[in-house]
Image (cartoon, coloured by chain):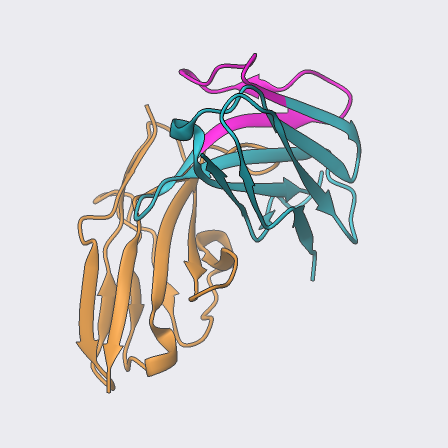
Amino acid sequence: GAVVSQHPSRVICKSGTSVKIECRSLDFQATTMFWYRQFPKQSLMLMATSNEGSKATYEQGVEKDKFLINHASLTLSTLTVTSAHPEDSSFYICSASESVGGEQYFGPGTRLTVT
Amino acid sequence: AQRVTQPEKLLSVFKGAPVELKCNYSYSGSPELFWYVQYSRQRLQLLLRHISRESIKGFTADLNKGETSFHLKKPFAQEEDSAMYYCALSPASGNTPLVFGKGTRLSVIA
């Protein structure tokens, strides 16, 4: 089956620094990738939709200057949390969708802790 | 607006008992409905989707447009079914984002 990887699996950073999270589709080409955020014991909240070669579409309330998304190739999307603050600490999950079929395949998630 | 409601945060059942995880949705068109499952320390994975009308791991879900529901059912729960279950809605097939419910944690007691 289709596999999506995320790197790193967990990261701890200091307040004010930036962190980059990678999402890769390993055995298929993903024209669209989605970034979600999950707080403890809560559901997934869609942050943005990322289409290869174009700007990401952010959900209402998500700061695009803070959460920079780049989808430079059909197998890689990155999320950069800029000037991270403790309230950005969360579990970030990406998913990828092939152009045909519609099923989204999820990555294992990245736990970000900002101290 | 699209919305998915899972009224139960936690559902505990005994092994061998029937299970029903409730899901209601709000959408004016004809959505695609999904159930995703997340086992302990594993990634979210698709369990089933309404358009395929199949049974996976003994689970079934029927889309009831009149009641706008997509409840997940299994006649006899197993311990390995213990997991977090999310109902999700997509306005259309293809590369559209999913709207997730808040999830229901199923605990199957031996």
The chain painted orange is: B
From what the image shows, is residue A61 above or below residue B59?
A: above
Asked which quadrant contains residue B35, the reply is: bottom left
Chain part drawn in magenta: A46-68
Q: Residue at x 36, y 52 (%)?
A: B86
**Is B50 or A66 nearer to us in this picture?**
A66
Asked which quadrant contains residue B10, the reply is: bottom left
Q: Residue at x 51, y 33 (%)?
A: B97
In the displayed structure image, the side of residue A9 where residue B57 appears, left or right: left
In the displayed structure image, the side of residue B46 where residue B87 appears, left or right: left
User: What is the x, y in percent for residue B100?
Assistant: 38, 41
User: What is the x, y in percent for residue A109?
Assistant: 54, 48
Q: Residue at x 27, y 56 (%)?
A: B104
**Is A99 or A72 nearer to us in this picture?**
A72
User: What is the x, y in percent for residue A89?
Assistant: 43, 35
| Residue B71 visible in rendering | no
Say whether residue A52 is magenta: yes
| Residue A66 visible in rendering | yes
**Is B12 or A15 nearer to us in this picture?**
A15
Q: Quadrant of the N terminus of chain A?
A: bottom right
**Figure label count:** 0
**Is A77 or A18 nearer to us in this picture?**
A18
The chain painted cyan is: A
User: What is the x, y in percent for residue B47?
Assistant: 47, 62
From what the image shows, is residue B8 above or below residue A52?
A: below
Say whether residue B41 is magenta: no
Q: Quadrant of the C terminus of chain A?
A: top left
In the displayed structure image, the side of residue A66 where residue B8 appears, left or right: left
Asked which quadrant contains residue A88, the reply is: top left
Q: Residue at x 70, y 56 (%)?
A: A2
